Image (cartoon, rainbow, N blue to C red):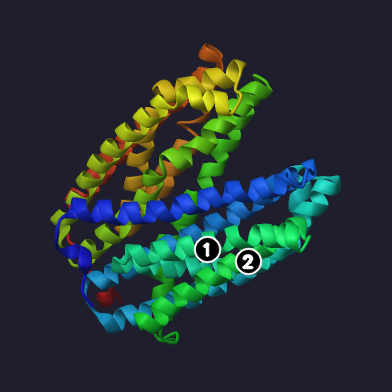
Amino acid sequence: MKAKFAEGSIFKHVCVMTFASTAGLLSLFLVDLVDMYWLSLLGIVELAAAIGYSGSILFFTLSLSIGLTIGCGALVAQSVGRENAADTQRLVGNLFSIIFAITVPVGAGVFLSAPWLLQWLGAEGVAAEYANSYLNIILPSMPILGLAMACSGVMRALGHAKEAMYLTLLGGLVNACLDPILIFGAGWGIEGAAIASVAARLAMLVYGFWRVAVIYQLVKRPDVASLPGDINLFAKTAFPAVLTNLATPIGVAYVTAIMAQFGDSAVAGNTVISKLQPLAFAGLFALSGAVGPIAGQNFGAQKLPRVMETLNSSVKFILAYSVVACLVLLALTDLLVLAFKAEGDAEALIRAFCYGLSTMFFFFGITFCTNALFNNLRMAHWATVFNFAKATVFTMPFASMGASMGGPVGVLIGLYVGAAIVAAAGYFMAYNKIRGLQVQPVTPVTERA
């Protein structure tokens, strides 16, 4: 089994992997908007609230699946780098078994706790009923999502970015096609939207498992002898990755609460910005899933100078992408204000973001990149440290200080400063850790006790 990323231009690998992942992410972001559009046509206000409440719960299950995928992809990429096909087959079979064993009880636990969780979130009345119905259909499919995402992680670890993109696009296509049929044609409303999501997850798993198990022939039955060792390795990477992903909603919730102090207009403006970010900067979100396999394969192949090159090439990509995205936002400022009918604080926030504060995503991109490298170089605890620091220490006081000095726009300025500090610290740590690897090579996984 050839380590595709262990040779050739690192910058080219970064660009190809990132742009392929970007297409898949954009499809998911657009499907989310389409989902809300179809449901809004029903004219029932409680449906939007129900999606919001259930989305908060599903976000945490998604974060778990993302963390498990990161752990799976990191270990597989390192195994591929060692070019040991038998070891990779054994590892993939064991990892899939571990992921299934984790997602089944977690999904069941969240399913049973859904009514209480909705109550804790403040859902009541018809909105709570809609949300509970939605969750009752989607939550049992958590193991399906976990394994589908794991298949995508394996594809990226192999360097098959296009195939991983197809998996995501397939899910988005199935969801987008079934939504109007089930919501309106069958008259199932929000339950129809939930069924469409489950069908999309099934389609992703079928395609992903077909490629990994049949085409690549990488799935073997769990190996009992090596399973304890693989569980230990997986926990060291996946557990910090899960914690890292769970940090984000903490900071988001705090910023929302700060904006709420200035009224609905400020909250609306911040919401518009939060919708613009994943679309305008999808490439930077995708980068975090792209650089990991590249670094992981070279780490496994002990080509450590190429790991450093991965960091530097990623920074170049982040800078170039950020410049283009920010210029596009600048050019579209008036159109965005008009499209969202923004006034007052909402307009001020959108203009401030598009006129220059959007450049904070250069720093976010650096943090995405360094966290991905930490996760794939057996330093996942550092990704957890930096993401929690970004979500708490470098968000809360900075947002509060910015709010007191500059109102809603001051909040964004505070976030900008905090993001810059975290990015600089993360880059410094990643650079020095990778440089240390060059003089202290890590023992391959196959030689572990």
Packing grade of label 1 (10 A; few <14, some 14-19, many >=20) is many
On screen, residue 34 versus residue 10, left or right, reads: right
Residue 18: numbered disc: none
Q: Is residue 189 visible?
A: yes
Q: Quadrant of residue 315?
A: top left
Residue 279: horizontal and vertical position, in percent?
46, 41
Residue 322: horizontal and vertical position, in percent?
33, 35
Q: Quadrant of residue 196?
A: bottom right
Q: Amino acid at mark 2?
A: Val
Q: Amino acid at mark 1?
A: Gly
What kind of element bears circle 1?
helix
On screen, residue 363 versus residue 392, left or right, reads: left
Q: Nearer the viewer, residue 123 or 402?
A: 123
Which residue extends farthest top? 405
On screen, residue 415 versus residue 202, left or right, reads: left
In the picture of the structure, the residue carrying the numbered disc 2 is 198
What kind of element bears circle 2?
helix
Quadrant where the image shows the N terminus: bottom left
Q: Identify which residue is drawn at 73% across, 52% down.
A: 117
Inter-mark Cα distance, 2 to 1: 10 Å
In the picture of the structure, the residue carrying the numbered disc 1 is 171
The reply to whether the C-beta atoms of the residues labelled 2 and 1 are less than 8 Å apart is no
Residue 173: horizontal and vertical position, in percent?
53, 61
